[in-house]
Image: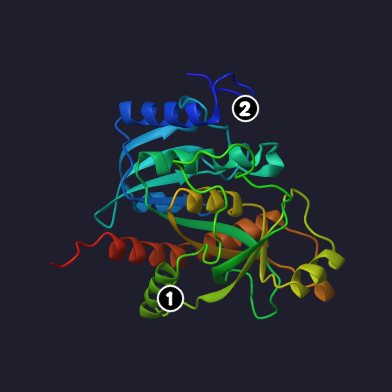
């Protein structure tokens, strides 16, 4: 089935509902927990006992991922015995998509019933205490992308017109991630994620500016997805993998292969934390 274009006559809401219906028909009814896997981190799906694997290309309305390291499929199954839905591959503004298109899969997962969203991404580290391969638990974000998926007509049954963003990243989930990292003796930094459009990397002056306004890590994703998720009442937790060090006074040209290698080296640590969080939030509540 070919993808619809953003200019399709059907409304955005209708496209979301149609995609959700198609997933249900393929046996992919989403559980309460969703996971977005970022650049170089898709191997977490090796730990997932998948019951249904649906390619984005086969789902109505889904964009097509153009990033080489992103597989472009939805997986439904169990992780640590807990039902989950995982996005293997995400979409970016720099690919030419609008914020609404970037957030489209999150809208679909929330429509299917996802209540908690765990997100990973690759990011540049601007804090001098962060090294390549470190994990940074996102406590807040600064949006410098110049756009967001909440503009335009509001779907009132999705969420409020004026969304409160005082706690975009759920404090309980953050505490749980820190607990699981501590249990596994995995260093886990905390910091503010600064979102840019890309695809170019930043100048030395831009890194200095972003650091001065409070950014600890910088990346090209996550914020549109979090905004859409929070709009629909979905709790969010996000962890960045520092794939390159962005210190303006000691800045080297980007090495994409080294960045992907750093993500791969961090993968076992991130996988262990995410598995621990999934196991905890999926545990039955004692009566």
Q: Is residue 43 above or below residue 194?
A: above
Looking at the image, how many numbered discs can be counted on the residues? Answer: 2
* Residue displayed at 63% across by 37% down: 66
| Residue shown at the point (64%, 23%) measured from the top left | 7
Q: Position of residue 268 (x, y in %)?
A: 44, 64
User: Left or right: 50 with respect to 137?
Assistant: left
For mark 1, give the secondary structure. Answer: helix
Q: Which residue is mark 2?
A: 6
In x, y percent, where is residue 102? 59, 41
Residue 201 horizontal/vertical position (percent):
77, 56
Residue 73 seen in the current view: yes
Q: Are marks 1 and 2 in contact (CB under 8 Å)?
A: no
Is residue 38 in sight in this rendering? no
Q: Residue at x 63, y 38 (%)?
A: 152
In space, the residues marked 1 and 2 are separated at their CA atoms by 39 Å
Name the outermost residue toward the left.
287
Colour style of the rendered protein structure: rainbow
176 up-or-down from 159: above or below: below
Left or right for 73, reference 122: left
Q: Quadrant of the C terminus?
A: bottom left
Would you name the residue on which mark 1 appears?
178
Q: Is residue 154 above or below residue 205?
A: above
């Amino acid at each position: 089935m070919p993808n619809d274009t953003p200019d399709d006559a059907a409304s955005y809401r209708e496209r979301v509902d149609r995609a959700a219906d198609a997933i249900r028909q393929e046996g992919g009814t989403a559980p309460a927990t969703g996971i977005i896997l970022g650049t170089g981190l898709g191997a977490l799906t090796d730990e997932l006992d998948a019951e249904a694997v649906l390619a984005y290309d086969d789902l109505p309305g889904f964009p097509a991922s153009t990033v080489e390291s992103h597989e472009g499929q939805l997986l439904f199954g169990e992780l640590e015995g807990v039902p989950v839905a995982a996005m293997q591959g995400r979409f970016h503004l720099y690919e030419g998509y609008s914020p609404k298109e970037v957030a489209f899969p999150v809208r679909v997962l929330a429509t299917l019933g996802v209540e908690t969203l765990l997100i990973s991404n690759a990011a540049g580290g601007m804090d001098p205490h962060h090294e390549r391969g470190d994990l940074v638990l996102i406590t807040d974000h600064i949006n410098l992308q110049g756009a967001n998926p909440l503009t335009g007509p509001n779907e009132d049954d999705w969420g409020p017109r004026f969304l409160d963003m005082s706690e975009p990243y759920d404090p309980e989930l953050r505490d749980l991630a820190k607990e699981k990292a501590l249990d596994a003796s995995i260093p886990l930094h905390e910091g503010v994620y600064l979102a840019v459009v890309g695809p170019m990397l930043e100048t030395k002056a831009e890194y200095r500016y972003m650091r001065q306004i409070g950014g600890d890590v910088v990346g090209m994703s996550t914020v549109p997805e979090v905004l859409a998720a929070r709009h629909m009442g979905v709790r969010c937790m996000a962890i960045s993998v520092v794939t390159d060090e962005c210190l303006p006074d000691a800045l080297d040209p980007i090495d994409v292969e080294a960045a992907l290698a750093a993500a791969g080296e961090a993968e076992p640590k991130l996988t262990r934390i995410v598995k621990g969080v999934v196991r905890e939030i999926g545990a039955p509540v004692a009566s």
